[in-house]
Amino acid sequence: MDKGYIVPETALKKLRTAKGLGQTVYIYGATGYGKTELVKQYLSKRRYRYISCAEDAAGLPELAEAAQSAGKEKEAQARTVVVVDDMHLLKNTQGRRAVFSLVKSRDIWLILICRSPIPTWLMPPYVSEGFLVITEDDLRLKEKEIAAYMGSQGLNITEEELAFVAERSQGNAYTVRHTALKMLEGRRPGPELAQEITEAFAAYLENYVMVQWDSDLLEFLMQVSVTDEFTLPLAEMVTGNRHAPELLERAMETGNFLSCRDGIYRLRPQLIRALRRRAAKEYGPQERADHAYNAGLYYEMQGQIMFALAMFEQCGKKERIRELLIRNARLNTGNGHYFELRRYYLQMEEKELEDCPVLMVGMSMLCSLLLQEESEYWYRKLEQFAAIAKGGQKREAVSRLACLDIALPHRGERGHGRDYEENAHPDL
């Protein structure tokens, strides 16, 4: 192996074990975890056949047929090493059948490299033949291995910097190497450098990884990336795509960038960044706003007010934000989520608040929670509104004043609201 290459020890041990047993190896992990490099370094002094499904998938059937013919003619003295890379791009049935044949061949030691865990179509040979699986966690560089790599590059790194690089890179070899290159330029690990590398990695994903995906899958993921996580119903609401279940299944098999737990799908932060970069180029402002608006409507229907507000803010729907704040303030005065929603209440202009008794109640409650004197200011504003209002608006204002008398801690010592309520009823 090259002197500058630091191998992930856990992955190397598994690879050696599989070699001794002649067992098919399945290696998977997201972009940048060094899957292909591990195999190339390990086989650097051996002869082997390498096929990339991104470039030469057509060679798989030919190779499988040749292996069958060789097996019939004579028993091989030494297994032929075959590496099939970029398995996530293998879509055609003929190529997949060729992989099945290679798995069963006793004359071949097969190494399969993919970005996703074992896909559904490969499960039958996995169960019947038994693969040794090298996971992303096995490929992840640990602090000791990162330190060794930095040392091989002639770099000194403090324990604090080492811990920072390990935590921020998540052991991703691409990120670690990029950090080392920047350190060779005189930079030091820290938040600023980490942000720069994150942006560069997002650009790499956008320009070299995502371009390999089917256009319908890329379009779907760009649309759902408006949220950090989503359910199947939310994905359907945002995209309006009735094929969402199928697309999510394909996404799971395309790369180890999408996880699902308890029905909630989560994209990796690096990919979200790349998808949003791409979406900003592919879609106009109105299209992007529509996706956020659809997400906001879904959250609103589900009663997830904080998420709904974030989406409506993102798409610039101020009227929807106002409606949600009014709805929140119309709850039992003591049950409104005023503190959690404080940013949205405080962003509203005073004129908007003065026109709505319910919003004035919300502001009075919020200011009280924040221990601000403006609580009484909004109470007085509501009193003034009630004095000149008519009909239903007057009844609502008087009712809200009575609620504030009970809910506001400092109101119990004053009784202004109760006196006003008694004087106000004759005017209803």
Image: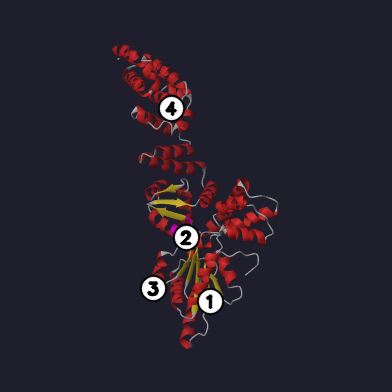
Give the residue at mark 4: 369
Front position among marks 2 and 1? 1
Front position among marks 1 and 4? 4
Front position among marks 2 and 3? 3
Give the residue at mark 2: 254
Real-space CA distance between mark 4 and mark 3, rounded to the nearest whole angstrom:
64 Å
Q: Is residue 307 visible?
A: yes
Real-space CA distance between mark 2 and mark 1, rounded to the nearest whole angstrom:
25 Å
* Residues at marks 2 and 3 touching, judged by CB atoms closer than 8 Å: no
Front position among marks 4 and 2? 4
Q: Nearer the viewer, residue 201 or 390?
A: 201
Q: Point out residue 211 in the picture as x, y percentages from the top left corner.
A: 54, 57
- Is residue 211 on the magenta stretch? no
Closer to the chain start, of discs 2 and 1, is: 1
Q: Amino acid at mark 1?
A: Val
Residue 128, disc: 3
- Is residue 252 on the magenta stretch? yes
Circle 3: element type = helix
Real-space CA distance between mark 1 and mark 4, rounded to the nearest whole angstrom:
69 Å
Quarter of the image that includes the N terminus: bottom right
Closer to the chain start, of discs 4 and 3, is: 3
Q: Residue at x 67, y 53 (%)?
A: 183
Q: Nearer the viewer, residue 319 or 129?
A: 129
Front position among marks 4 and 3? 4
Circle 1: element type = strand
User: What span is colored magenta in the figure?
Assistant: 251-257
Residue 392, disc: none
Q: Where 111 sits versus 155, above or below?
A: below
- Horizontally, residue 425 falls left or right of residue 235, namely left
Disc 2: CA contacts within 10 A as few (<14), some (14-19) or many (>=20): many
Q: Amino acid at mark 4?
A: Leu
